[in-house]
Image (tube, helix red, strand yellow):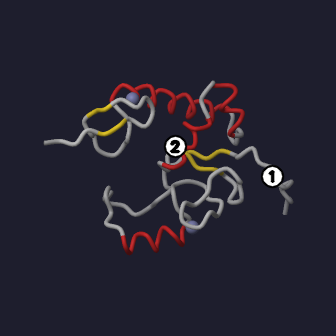
């Protein structure tokens, strides 16, 4: 018997479909939103998080989830937007900072064992909208 999972977006119960914790319907709209972000960032490289939120009408929560899933990545290390669930440090994508990631990997079995170990490889990068210090050029 399969345990049903609650969709993280709409709260409906559905059969687990692997990696993403959303139902098939939300998954589709999720994919199209992600595509819109991708296109947007192609046109506006280094757009800020809140530009994306405002221009595409996509919720911050959703963007945060993309970040957690390592599908997006914030450019700045100190972004005050996404934090490690282990130690609370600013991180650019995923759930844990590198140190906690390593620690947790020792203890937790890898659920989704992708062959390659490159955590951030394909992530799309953009800027947080934090009080980013003026980039001291050179
Ligand atoms: Zn759903
Ligand atoms: Zn940490």
Q: Nearer the viewer, residue 9 or 34?
A: 9
- Which percent across, then down, holds residue 69? 47, 48
32 sits to left or right of 59? left
Crowdedness of circle 1 by 10 Å Cα count: few (<14), some, many (20+)?
A: few
34 sits to left or right of 138? left
- Which percent across, then down, holds residue 123? 52, 48
Please, what secondary structure does the residue beneath circle 2 have? helix
User: Is 100 placed above or below 45 here?
Assistant: below
Residue that appears at 25% across and 38% down = 4
Quarter of the image where one finds residue 138 = bottom right
**Which is closer to the viewer, label 2 or label 1?**
2
**Structural distance between the alpha carbons of marks 2 and 1:** 22 Å
Q: Which residue is mark 1?
A: 132
Please, what secondary structure does the residue beneath circle 1 have? loop
Residue that appears at 77% across and 48% down = 130
95 sits to left or right of 22? right
Q: Which comes sooner in the sequence, label 2 or label 1?
A: 2
Residue that appears at 35% across and 68% down = 108
User: Is 117 placed above or below 34 here?
Assistant: below
User: Is 1 placed above or below 103 here?
Assistant: above
Task: Find the residue positioned furthest to the left.
Answer: 1
Q: Which residue is mark 2?
A: 65
- Which percent across, then down, holds residue 92? 61, 55
Quarter of the image where one finds residue 114 = bottom left
């Amino acid at each position: 018997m399969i345990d049903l999972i609650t969709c993280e977006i709409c709260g409906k119960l559905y059969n687990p479909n692997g990696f993403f914790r959303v139902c098939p319907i939300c998954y589709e709209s999720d994919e199209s939103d992600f595509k819109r972000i991708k296109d947007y960032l192609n046109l506006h490289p280094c757009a800020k998080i809140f530009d994306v939120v405002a221009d595409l009408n996509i919720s911050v929560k959703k963007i945060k989830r993309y970040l957690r899933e390592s599908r997006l990545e914030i450019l700045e290390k100190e972004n005050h937007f996404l934090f490690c669930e282990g130690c609370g440090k600013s991180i650019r994508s995923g759930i844990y900072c590198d140190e906690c990631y390593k620690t947790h990997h020792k203890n937790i079995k890898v659920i989704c064992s992708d062959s390659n170990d490159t955590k951030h490889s394909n992530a799309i990068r953009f800027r947080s909208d934090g009080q980013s210090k003026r980039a001291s050029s050179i």
